[in-house]
Image (spheres, helix red, strand yellow):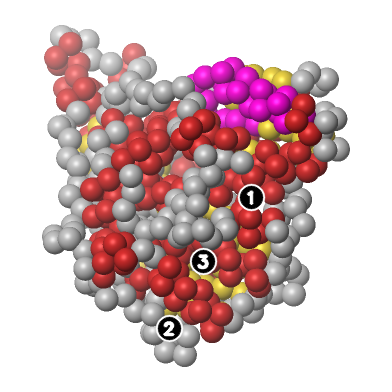
Amino acid sequence: MNIHIVEQPEVVVGCAAVFTLPSPALDHSGIGHLVEHLVFRTSAVFPERHNLFALTSLTRCKMNASTTGNKSYYFAQADTAEDLLLLIEYLYAGLMTRTYAARDIEQEKSVIQHELAFYAKHPAYQKQSQIWRGDQHPDAYQHWGGLPDILAQLTADDVYAYKSQYYQDSAISLIASGVTVEDIRAVLSKVQTNISVEHQQALTHPKQPVIYQPYTRSDDKQGLNQPRIYSWWLPAQYQRSVLAQLPIWQTQWPELYVEEELNHRGKFAIRYLCQEKESPENACQESACQESICHEDECEARAQKFAGWFAGQVVTDEPQIPTMTQFPECIQALLASGLPVNDKSVTGSLQSTAPKLHHIDQQEPANISTILISQLIGEPHISHIAQLPEHQMLKTSAIDTSKSSMLSHQGSPSIIQRFTDTVDCECGSYQPRTITQLLDDMGDKEFLIREDMWVIKIKDIPSETITSLCQSSTFWAPRVQGQLYTMGVFEQDGLYYVWGAGDRHPADNMMYIQALIDNAKTRYQ
């Protein structure tokens, strides 16, 4: 593992760390996205399924992750070095765990199905998914979030193969501040020691072959009469220049669309969306078949005109700086610091004995220079907007409290206990933006449900009762067992709020949580 310690600006308080590793999207299944969820769900060292939610609700610690088309980022932020090292231990154990029970796979797939349905409410997301699904070019974007019908097919064997291929210790980089390299090495070594004998054998002697097999699908014939899309792919180092000029370009070519993310090959797409003209002067007056040909010819002519103009534009070769604007400022600062190549002074000796992974081709950053786009592109690739199948949720049974009991691991205290025994709990430090409108509309009501979101207001309850609830796995059963996308607790103006989002059965899950709260109030009175 490559470990890089950086100095944070004085305005940044606390300690922070971020793991980065390659996680290419090889198909539309969202395998990298599923693996990201599983890293937080459970591990061979910290098996409790509700660790993430309890820690982020009970403490000032922050943890999260993001997966793109070619990379994954896992971050942690804490007030002290001791706390950060415990979070690094938790994350590293999740990164190194490869074997999961089928039930864990199915329940987390259900969570992601709720997440995808939550995003699918937005037209822009739907349009992007349709563009990606209809594209058959080798450089076409693979939907790293996952398309529901293909996500549903993933198995525990797929997860094992993918993590064995890409989640290798030698492929992981860790950028941190507020801790020392020696302390980090001690934590990583501790995780490797604590992993069970069976898992350690799988880690060092993986089954052969351990190659993830991408899922294929039949072509979407429904899209053939949809608007045509002309696409070109450019290397990553020209993206900043293109995005800077995009507003000006779009005043002349409103049909121009630029992908803001990199694909699995480290490129980005520039697209011309050729919508059919509806005006009478552009409509054919003959048969439907001839009208279709006429529209196609007009579309081709407009696209050729755009291609000629586009080829004459100038772009600048600039280094690609990773930015994850959804992450805290200190994590963005760590990523912006960059990671030196082959930094021998901070590269630890904890190298994995697993076979080396197949690295994605990476281009060396070039000196800043300008170039005509015509020197970078050839003929456009033509595709169509695909029809997406109806979103089908995985079937989940009613909440089973027997499945949410606290698990122990060789008699060691859970990470929640280790934190709450030493850290003053500050329940409810995180308030999501997604439910801001619900809070504004809630008024004096004790609860509110809107579509797939809900919120409960809790009055007259001691903080220690809320803490006890958040420590229990039973409280987080709706999320752990795949009933909804996400849930949490926060405090505002002396009141506590419990919320859920991406929930197909909001009334049922809200009533379940309300019953736990009522029982806790009675028990602690």
Asked if the stretch drawn in magenta spans residue 513, the answer is: yes
Identified by mark 2, the residue type is: Gly
Residue 97 position within the rendered picture, expressed as x and y whole percent measured from the top left: 37, 58
Q: Is 3 above or below relative to 438?
A: below
Q: Is 435 above or below relative to 34?
A: above
Image quarter in which the C terminus is found: top right
**Circle 2 residues within 10 Å: few <14, some 14–19, many ≥20:** some
Foreground of the two, 220 or 514: 514
**Secondary structure beneath disc 3?**
helix
Residue 512 in view in this figure: yes
Disc number at residue 56? 1
Residue at 57 percent of width and 58 percent of height: 413
Residue 407 position within the rendered picture, expressed as x and y whole percent measured from the top left: 49, 47
Q: Main secondary structure of the magenta part?
A: helix
Residue at 63 percent of width and 60 percent of height: 418
- Which region shows up in magenta? 499-521
**Secondary structure beneath disc 2?**
loop
Image quarter in which the N terminus is found: bottom left
Q: Earlier in the sequence, mark 2 or mark 1?
A: 1
Identified by mark 1, the residue type is: Thr
Per the image, the residue denoted by label 3 is 89
Disc number at residue 348? 2
- In three-dimensional space, the C-alpha distance between marks 3 and 2, rounded to whole angstroms, equals 16 Å
Which mark is nearer the camera, 3 or 2? 3
Identified by mark 3, the residue type is: Glu
Residue at 31 percent of width and 62 percent of height: 199
Residue 45 position within the rendered picture, expressed as x and y whole percent measured from the top left: 45, 60
